[in-house]
């Protein structure tokens, strides 16, 4: 696999001028301005006009603390843009007569994860592709559940794609990435795309970044997931979009099915929200009615990678962009409008924070100005923050996740000044205090949260865990040596739903100790030191999970 062989020009961008209204210079200027304003380190863009790829280019940096630049061959996480590409392969199998969109999936492959609920026998490939299975997006630490009668309404779900992936693998007798290579990547010439990490990607890939611009290591998973694991480039994904525009490899009637509304979506993420008249869902793509015409679209969000695609099929105009930033979807409207003018209802449906919103500007300025200076433009005459309570808590928690404990405490204290009766802010503030090593004040703050909201299970659980940590009770003792300067150490694993605020270590001299009561069985876990998830240095036994993450293993006999 080579991700540099496709460029005929041999440079960082490619353009084919078709429409005099298209200006690469204006797009470049706009993209750089948006990236700077939204604190996005790197971006890759593909522009389609009149059914042809007219421009692909990389902007910015692979990693914020390096000088290596993004180019048209840079590999990005496609996140949920994985789903439409997988959908294309499903349609190929349908046309080959190997799978029916309306045959219940259990007839191809029973699903033990949900076999206890007979309603799952109604679920079809059509329901998966239109997000009407009744599954949640992800099950988290819970067992998989059906939340409503399959086919009844829209509810976005990655879990449905996991089930359909297993069905496809059963039908073909091949692992997902091999299926995608045969059905999609090779026929369409997508030479830099894979649902599992390839060694060739190591020379040119974008690192993920937090909303503050802090880079992280890239997770290079060897486990394929149809819902989110696609690694690709702007050039490759634009090539895939051309296949939809021109019906390449699939029939006219199949494309018509794909882009026909199957279900309406609510105007907001609320149980009582009315259904949208402008936004719906097809089979694999979202659909929106705009001033320019009907547009098919999708977004991708793997946290620290974000991306978006929108195409006016009738006009043959569209765009795809990938970012290596948590902030990447705050510029959706401005990016799409460069190619498809007018308002895009899908952007409102997704409801991501706009890059010019007060909370976005506040978060952007914290690293360079500090909390006090960054909040100054957003204080009222009494010196209280005018940013919404939940948004401030979110910023505080993001700072905490980045190890910026002092700044997180400042944000939570600002929020408590503006919202003194906020149980959630007291709870989040307490976590920051724990991370700062102030256990007694944290316990007092948790109790204040309970006084306001007595039924807060999370707070009760934390208090119980802190109290239990003072008693060395349990059949299993885990110790951590060499970290006498650590301020908070916890244990997260399969035995506590990977909750890093459930099971606390206590410090005994220079050693951290944790006692847990475990039934016989095999457990995976990690130690969490001051927010850093780490393997147990005293346990050489490890196991890699389906997400590609390696965990320590504990066997209780």
Image (cartoon, grey):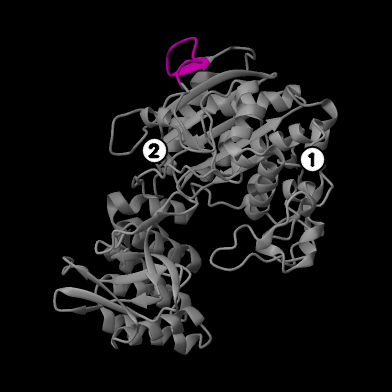
The residue sitting at 79% across, 40% down in the picture is 99
Quarter of the image where the C terminus is located: bottom left
Find the distance from the CA under tag 2 to the CA under tag 1. 42 Å
Neighbour tally class for label 2: few under 14, some 14-19, many 20 plus, Cα within 10 Å: many
For label 1, the crowd category at 10 Å Cα-Cα, with few meaning under 14, some 14 to 19 and many 20 or more, is: some
Residue 55 shows up from this direction: yes
Which contiguous range is marked in magenta? 3-14
Q: Position of residue 554 (x, y in %)?
A: 37, 67
In the rendered image, residue 279 lying in the magenta stretch gets the answer no
Q: Which residue is identified by label 2?
A: 41
User: In percent of the image, x 58 and y 12: which residue is there?
Assistant: 16
Q: Main secondary structure of the magenta part?
A: loop
Look at the image and tell me whether residue 422 can be seen.
no
| 9 magenta-colored | yes
Q: Earlier in the sequence, mark 2 or mark 1?
A: 2
- Of residues 337 and 534, the one drawn nearer to the viewer in this rendering: 534
Q: x and y percent of residue 523 in the render?
A: 43, 67
What element does badge 2 sit on? loop
Relative to the observer, which residue lies in front, 252 or 459? 252
The part of the image, by quadrant, that contains residue 100 is top right
Q: Residue at x 31, y 69 (%)?
A: 409
| Residue at the spot of label 1 | 99
User: Which of 507/405 is in front?
Assistant: 507
Q: Is residue 483 left or right of 228 when viewed as pictured?
A: left
Residue extending furthest toward the top: 8
Q: Position of residue 71 (x, y in %)?
A: 43, 24
């Amino acid at each position: 696999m080579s991700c540099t062989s496709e460029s005929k020009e041999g440079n960082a961008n490619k353009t084919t001028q078709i429409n005099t209204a298209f200006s690469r210079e204006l797009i470049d200027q706009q993209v750089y301005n948006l990236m700077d304003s939204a604190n996005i380190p790197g971006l890759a863009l593909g522009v389609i006009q009149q059914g042809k790829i007219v421009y692909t280019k990389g902007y910015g940096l692979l990693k914020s603390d390096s000088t290596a630049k993004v180019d048209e061959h840079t590999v990005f996480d496609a996140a949920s843009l994985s789903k439409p590409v997988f959908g294309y392969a499903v349609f190929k199998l349908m046309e080959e007569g190997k799978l029916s969109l309306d045959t219940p999936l259990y007839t191809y492959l029973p699903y033990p994860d949900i076999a206890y609920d007979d309603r799952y026998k109604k679920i079809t490939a059509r329901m998966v592709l239109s997000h009407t299975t009744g599954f949640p997006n992800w099950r988290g630490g819970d067992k998989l559940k059906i939340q409503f009668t399959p086919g009844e309404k829209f509810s976005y779900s990655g879990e449905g794609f996991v089930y359909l992936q297993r069905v496809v693998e059963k039908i073909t007798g091949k692992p997902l990435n091999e299926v995608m290579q045969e059905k999609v990547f090779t026929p369409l010439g997508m030479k830099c795309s894979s649902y599992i990490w390839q060694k060739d990607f190591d020379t040119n890939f974008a690192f993920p970044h937090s909303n503050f611009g802090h880079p992280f290591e890239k997770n290079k998973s060897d486990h394929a997931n149809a819902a989110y694991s696609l690694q690709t480039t702007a050039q490759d994904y634009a090539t895939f979009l051309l296949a939809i525009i021109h019906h390449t490899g699939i029939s006219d009637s199949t494309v018509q099915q794909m882009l026909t509304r199957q279900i309406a979506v609510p105007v907001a993420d609320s149980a009582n929200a009315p259904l949208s008249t402008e936004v719906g869902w097809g089979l694999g793509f979202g659909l929106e009615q705009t001033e320019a015409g009907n547009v098919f679209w999708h977004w991708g969000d793997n946290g620290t990678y974000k991306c978006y695609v929108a195409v006016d099929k009738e006009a043959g105009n569209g765009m795809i962009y990938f970012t290596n930033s948590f902030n990447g979807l705050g510029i959706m409207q401005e990016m799409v409008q460069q190619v498809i003018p007018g308002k895009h209802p899908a952007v409102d449906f997704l409801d991501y924070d706009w890059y010019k919103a007060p909370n976005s500007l506040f978060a952007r300025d914290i690293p360079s100005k500090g909390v006090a200076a960054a909040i100054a433009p957003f204080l009222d005459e009494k010196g209280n923050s005018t940013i919404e309570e939940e948004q401030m808590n979110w910023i505080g928690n993001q700072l905490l996740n980045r190890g910026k404990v002092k700044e997180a405490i400042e944000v939570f204290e600002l929020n408590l000044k503006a919202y003194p009766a906020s149980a959630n802010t007291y709870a989040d503030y307490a976590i920051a205090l724990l991370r700062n090593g102030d256990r007694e004040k944290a316990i007092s703050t948790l109790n204040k949260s309970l006084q306001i909201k007595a039924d807060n299970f999370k707070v009760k659980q934390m208090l119980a865990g802190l109290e239990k940590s003072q008693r060395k009770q349990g059949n299993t003792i885990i110790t951590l040596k060499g970290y006498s300067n650590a301020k908070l150490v916890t244990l997260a694993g399969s035995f506590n739903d990977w909750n890093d605020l459930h099971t606390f270590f206590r410090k005994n001299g220079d050693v951290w100790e944790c006692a847990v009561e475990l039934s016989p069985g095999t457990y995976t876990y990690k130690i969490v030191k001051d927010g850093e998830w780490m393997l147990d240095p005293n346990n050489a036994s490890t196991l890699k999970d389906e997400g590609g993450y390696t965990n320590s293993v504990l066997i209780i006999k």
